[in-house]
């Protein structure tokens, strides 16, 4: 497994204000609106539910009591049902990308966005980056809906910024294939080109999605990750229209000044 630690930003000339704002919004929503993940009613109401999007209607289901294994032994837990959505259900395709299922989910996503997002904002500009991020997130959500419109996951809420961030990583692969990325690879800290860091991550998503198709439920929307990534690759160059293509090639130039500029 590969985990990014940082990348070379020595050529960045502006502060990534949009990227920082996106991270801040995600954190604020999780802390104050989701109550650190404990407000299940809010979370369920604004998450994407494939059956709602396909059926073009809001679904409300009763709470369920399920048995959960704990260190103290099995105990009953009330699992909230689908909640009434106070906005048109189509808008949940966007609202869901600013919510997370837990602190680990949030921190993991924000770390990836912090590392890769600033480069893309620098490449295409702040306004375009905002639109690009939202577009990739929207297409990722739609991919998840289409892949789960008729199976058991059709009424399971989906949430998280992973789809939009996958789009950012798709753009990174296309625009920064040779940028030096510091990664944790099998417990070893090393440096690899961008196409290796992002490429290995994408291969893992594809392999994991095959397990889901085979009936293994992981609770991760790998289809959304793949859809967002493909959208990022497809739209990276169009969003670069009229702007200079990044020329910084830290891998081939031998620039090893990576860690001090992580971000």
Image (cartoon, rainbow, N blue to C red):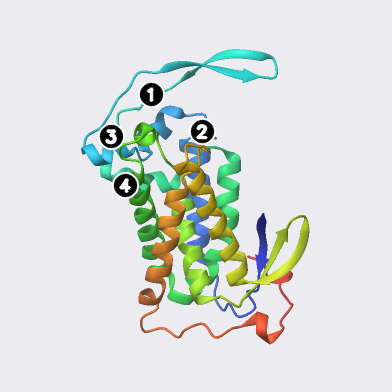
State if disc 3 and disc 2 touch (CB < 8 Å). Answer: no
Cα gap from disc 2 to disc 3, whole angstroms: 19 Å
Asked whether residue 197 is in view, the answer is: yes
Q: Is residue 43 left or right of residue 13?
A: left
Cα gap from disc 3 to disc 1, whole angstroms: 15 Å
Cα gap from disc 3 to disc 4, whole angstroms: 23 Å
Give the labeled residue for mark 1: 81
**Could you tell me which secondary element the residue under label 3 belongs to?**
loop
> Which residue is at 30% across, 37% downward?
150
Cα gap from disc 1 to disc 2, whole angstroms: 18 Å
Give the labeled residue for mark 4: 146
Question: Earlier along the polypeptide chain: callout 1 or callout 4?
Answer: 1
Q: Residue 217 placed where, x, y %?
A: 50, 36
> Which residue appears farthest toward the right when viewing the image?
188
Q: Which of the labelled discs sits on residue 86, or is there none?
A: 3
Cα gap from disc 1 to disc 4, whole angstroms: 22 Å
**Could you tell me which secondary element the residue under label 4 belongs to?**
helix
Of circles 1 and 2, the one toward us is 1
Which quarter of the rendered picture does the N terminus lie within? bottom right
Q: Residue 94 placed where, x, y %?
A: 35, 49
Q: Which of the labelled discs sits on residue 35, or is there none?
A: 2
Q: Which of the labelled discs sits on residue 116, or is there none?
A: none
Label 3 environment density (alpha carbons within 10 Å; few <14, some 14–19, many ≥20): few
């Amino acid at each position: 497994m590969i985990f990014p630690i940082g990348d070379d930003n020595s050529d960045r000339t502006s502060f990534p204000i949009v990227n920082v704002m996106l991270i801040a919004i995600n954190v604020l929503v999780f802390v104050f609106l989701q109550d650190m993940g404990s407000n299940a009613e809010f979370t369920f109401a604004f998450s994407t539910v494939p059956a709602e999007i396909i059926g073009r209607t809001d679904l409300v289901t009763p709470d369920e009591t399920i048995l959960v294994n704990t260190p103290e032994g099995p105990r009953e837990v009330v699992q909230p049902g689908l909640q009434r959505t106070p906005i048109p259900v189509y808008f949940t395709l966007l609202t869901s990308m600013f919510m997370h299922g837990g602190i680990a989910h949030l921190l993991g996503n924000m770390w990836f966005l912090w590392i890769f997002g600033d480069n893309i904002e620098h490449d295409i500009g702040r306004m375009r980056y905002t639109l690009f991020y939202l577009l990739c997130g929207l297409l990722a959500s739609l991919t998840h809906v289409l892949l789960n419109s008729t199976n058991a996951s059709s009424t399971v809420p989906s949430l998280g910024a992973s789809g939009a961030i996958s789009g950012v990583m798709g753009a990174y692969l296309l625009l920064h294939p040779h940028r030096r990325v510091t990664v944790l690879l099998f417990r070893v800290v090393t440096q690899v080109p961008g196409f290796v860091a992002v490429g290995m991550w994408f291969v893992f998503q594809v392999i994991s999605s095959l397990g889901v198709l085979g009936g293994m439920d992981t609770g991760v929307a790998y289809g959304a990750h793949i859809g967002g990534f493909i959208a990022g690759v497809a739209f990276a160059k169009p969003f670069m229209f009229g702007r200079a293509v990044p020329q910084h090639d830290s891998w081939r130039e031998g620039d090893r000044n990576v860690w001090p500029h992580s971000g």
